[in-house]
Amino acid sequence: MGFRLGRSVAVVLAMASFASLASGPVRAESWDSIGRYASLIRRAGTETMVAKDCPPSLLGAFHSQRNALLLCSNNLENDPKQIWVVLAHESAHVMQHCHGGALLADHQVDQALEAIEARSRTTFQELRLYHQSQQREEIEARLVQGLPPQEVEALFRSFCADRLLRGSVPVPPGVSHEPPETP
């Protein structure tokens, strides 16, 4: 199941995540695709940074007040697959920032949790480490990190369309700048 515009982006996000359970997460295979996506994030006004001195367990972060996405090179392998997962995860927080809140409708959160648990019990258990106030954001980020790169980019373009329009980022054919529908 691919990303289809014209439907609620939140619904598509949930359905695409559930569909990805059968095949497992799809990740970027090249540094070029990571570079292009990071460039798109920057063109939407989000600073991207790489740090070499992060705490041992931190792979990445998004600081909403600074509108800055951080990747922790001292804790990441030199592997585009791993870096893509972290970049996609943190970009979900950028999407939440662009959108001004949650990406999923309230009624979709339980299904999202079930999908995460089915994909990875460890990832599901990691959610318990977050304060209750952060769990929904992290659930959405974990769903996004498991989507194919083209779906992550389409979601980013959709949720951050206003910022991209101001930045004059070229949009591929068939991708709309329409804001996401609210359920």
Image (cartoon, grey):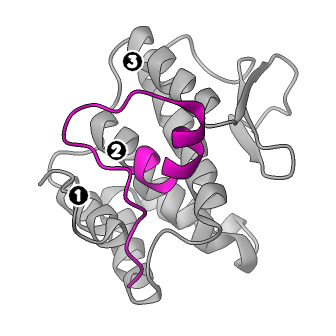
Image height of 84 relative to 132, above or below: above
Q: Which residue is mark 2?
A: 154
Regarding residue 121, the answer to whether it shows in the image is yes
Q: Position of residue 155 (x, y in %)?
A: 39, 50
Within-10-Å neighbours for mark 2: few <14, some 14–19, many 20+: many
Regarding residue 26, the answer to whether it shows in the image is no
Which residue is pictured at 27% across the width and 43% down the height? Answer: 175
Instruction: Classify the position of the C terminus by image quarter.
Output: bottom left
Mark 2 vs mark 3: in front? 2
Which tag, 1 or 3, sits closer to the chain's start?
1
Which residue is pictured at 80% across the width and 32% down the height? Answer: 56
Within-10-Å neighbours for mark 1: few <14, some 14–19, many 20+: some
Image height of 167 relative to 52, above or below: below
Disc 3 is placed on an element classified as helix
Q: Position of residue 135 (x, y in %)?
A: 63, 72
Q: Which residue is mark 1?
A: 5
* Amino acid type assigned to the residue bearing label 1 in the image: Leu
Q: Mark on residue 33? A: 3
Q: Are marks 2 and 1 in contact (CB under 8 Å)?
A: yes
* Amino acid type assigned to the residue bearing label 2 in the image: Ala
Image height of 137 relative to 90, above or below: below
Which residue is pictured at 52% across the width and 28% down the height? Answer: 40
Which tag, 2 or 3, sits closer to the chain's start?
3
Q: Are marks 2 and 3 in contact (CB under 8 Å)?
A: no
Q: Position of residue 6 (x, y in %)?
A: 22, 65
The one nearer the camera, 148 or 103, is: 103
* Amino acid type assigned to the residue bearing label 3 in the image: Ser
Marks 2 and 1, Cα distance to the nearest angstrom? 9 Å
Q: Mark on residue 37? A: none
Over which residues does the magenta segment extend?
Answer: 155-183
Which residue is pictured at 48% across the width and 56% down the height? Answer: 159
Instruction: Classify the position of the N terminus by image quarter.
Output: bottom left
